[in-house]
Image (tube, grey):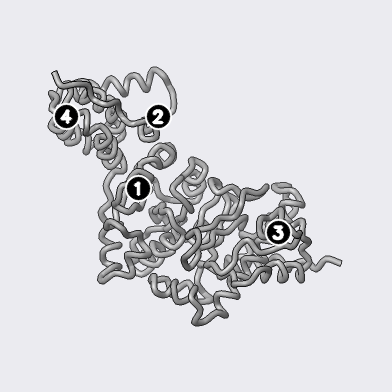
Amino acid sequence: MEIWVPLPTVTAELRGDVSVGLRLGDGAVTSDDRRLMEAHLAAGLFFREQLLRSGMGWAAAHLAQRGLGHVLRSSSPWKIGYAPDGWARLVDHLRSHGFDDKTLLSAGLASATKKGYLVDRFRDRIIFPAWDAAEELVGFVGRSRGGRAKYLNSPTTRIYQKSHTLVGLVEQRDLLESGATPVFVEGPMDAAAVDELSRLTSRGWAGLGVCGTGLSFHQASMVYQCSGSKTAIVGVDADGGGRLAAVRWLDDLSSVFERVLVAEFPSGHDPSSLLETPAGADRLFEALSSPRPLAELAIEVELARWSRVLDHISGRVNALRRVAPLVARLPHDKVAGQLGELAKVLELDQDIVSREVVETLGRSTRRALPNRPLDSLTASDPPDPGPSL
């Protein structure tokens, strides 16, 4: 006989609000999918209890070191947990609560060895819940202590796709509904760091982890639907990789939010690592308090790609054509200054630069196509320059 997990109790423990629990019986999901969600809720409670009981274990120590000691309080909205070391601790726990092996495999919580034994997918990792648009717990992100892949996501299942989930969506709901500006960051620990700083300073930021370098239109829409803000901030490391990742988010965020800004952290740092440094909270506060349009960063990144051909007139003109759609997406009060800067950098007459931007706007309107000006960022590099004339 199956022993069903008391779902409202589990949901309330993880979220602190029974009213946003699983939508049982409303036809939104199948009975099989509901069972997978129940398994995740039970697993989330197990992971949470393991973290709170671990006391002085490495997971709790690491969170405290990163300035996230608040998540260790049972009252914290962040129900971060810990997957204990061992081959089948979660498997044994869920079996004892009536979940069969098929469910554990279908949920992505376990995998089968060559000999047919089930083992935990997450072992000896800090665990972050991943929520879908309906605010259901459908997956996890696990952070290792080192020596393995830093982050491990749940595998794609019937209920989980990484591009359709966010870390922090439920935990930040109160901030988002009150008008806090969503701050999209790569890592789940960074989302919790932004949240902590926001609540300490009453500045109204809501941290959301996309769990990788990709952000989808679906993720942007999830946040917009529960947010009172028309502005979004992207938080990035100031190094090349972080900047390029942020620029790739511009299209999807701009399709949803009226203003898309970027907060740049000191090179080599993300929000959670910054909190470890001297005056780290002040430095993080400064970065989030002084964001600039993400389109400005996109222009810089694109011009850098064309730098080796800018000594040719054809290279300068082609570079202008690449960045013109980005200039058109700047706030109105930033356009004139950017036109002047481009004319200076590209050594072109400002009238030429202005005309190209206007013509780009006209072409976009006539075609009535979605703006995709950042395709060049994932395309091949500009052609090699020919011999100087």
Quarter of the image for residue 346 reads top left
Instruction: State which tag comes first along the sequence, 4 or 1.
Output: 1
Give the camera-side residue of 220 and 245.
245
Say which element carries label 3: loop
Q: Amino acid at mark 3?
A: Thr
Asked which quadrant contains residue 343, the reply is top left
Does residue 364 appear in the picture of this structure?
yes
Task: Specify the amino acid type for callout 2.
Answer: Asn
Quadrant of the drawing holding the N terminus = bottom right
Q: Is residue 364 left or right of residue 84?
A: left
Q: CA distance from mark 3 to mark 4?
A: 59 Å
- Picture disc at residue 241: 1
Q: Residues within 10 Å of mark 2 (few under 14, many from 20)?
A: some
The tag on residue 371 is 2
Q: Tell me whether the residue at label 3 lies in contact with that at label 1, contact meaning CB atoms closer than 8 angstroms.
A: no
Spatial CA span between label 2 and label 4: 24 Å
Residue 346 numbered mark, or none: 4
* Residue name at image x 77 percent, y 52 percent: 31
- Front tag of 3 and 2: 3
N-terminal of the pair, mark 2 or mark 4, is: 4
Which type of secondary structure does the marked residue at label 2 adopt? loop
At 29% from the left and 25% from the top, the residue drawn is 383
Residue 46 in the image, given as x and y percentages of width and height:
64, 71
